[in-house]
Amino acid sequence: MARHGITIGVVEAIQRRVSERVRKRVNVSREEGGRILRYPPGLFLVIGGVGFLLFLGLGLGFWVSDEPYGMKVFYCVQAAIFAVMSLALIREGRAVIWVDSVGVGAKSPWRWWSVELRWEEVTELRWGGRALMWYRIKGVAGTIRVHAWLGGRLLEDYFARHLSEEIAREAIAEANLVERHKWREFWRTRVDEAEERIEDELCQ
């Protein structure tokens, strides 16, 4: 169990470090006055590949260890699950999000259709917490999930600019680790910042 705890600790440390860097460096391109958001090229290929090799090595190490047979199987199954999840990350890196003044859309590599929501159709915005690190945007046409590494601060700008305080304030405040008693002040500042940045970008 100690080995398992160390492994999880290493993975979480890597996730935090990558998150700090990627969140502010979203791969953005312009299209018809809006923005196309993609993961930085090769990011998930590297993370997924390294993760797969890491957990594959751990699995082999557990199998040849002196642990009881039952514990070997337990550790190896866990390592195999994480190895498969690492490979899935490579595919996840192909996700695309587009935003403009009309709404937000997403094309997930896990389904053949895309989902588009107009801002006035959005009924709920939720933050998945530090473990999941994604926004869940729910509307009439479906649900869009956007990871913080993909959306970054630019997506939050569009939320603050086009969604109501009632829908967006809590999620954005939680994502930025703002204390509850400071939410209202934070929201007013965030809306002003978003409006200024988006206007500047449109004028460029």
Image (tube, grey):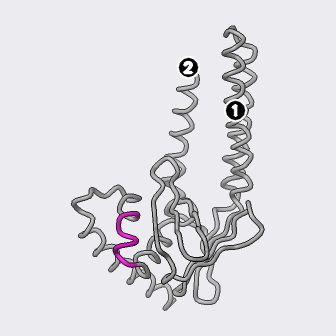
At x 45%, y 75%, the residue is: 159
- Disc on res. 175: none
Residue contact between numbered discs 1 and 2, judged by CB atoms under 8 Å: no
Q: Name the residue under label 1.
A: 55
- Is residue 28 highlighted in magenta? no
In the displayed image of the protein, which residue is found farthest to the right? 112
Q: Give the percent coordinates (x, y) of residue 103.
A: 55, 82
Density class for disc 1 (Cα within 10 Å; few <14, some 14-19, many ≥20) is: many
Q: Dominant secondary structure of the magenta stretch?
A: helix
Locate the N terminus and report the quarter of the image it occupies: top right
Q: What residue type is labelled 2?
A: Met
Give left or right: position of 3 versus 55. Answer: left
* Range drawn in magenta: 164-171
On screen, residue 70 above or below 93: above
Query: Residue at the location (58% across, 84% down)?
Result: 34
Q: What residue type is labelled 1?
A: Phe
The image quadrant of residue 56 is top right
Q: Where is residue 191 in the image (x, y as percent from the top left)?
A: 34, 78
Task: Say if 148 sits above or below 159 in the image.
Answer: above
Instruction: Count numbered badges in the picture.
Output: 2
92 w.r.t. 69: above or below: below
Quickly name the residue at label 2: 1
Q: Quadrant of residue 182?
A: bottom left
Q: Position of residue 86 (x, y in %)?
A: 70, 43
**What is the residue that sits farthest to the front in this orientation?**
140
Residue at point 63%, 63% (across, down): 39
Query: Looking at the image, which residue is at 48% across and 55% down?
Result: 128
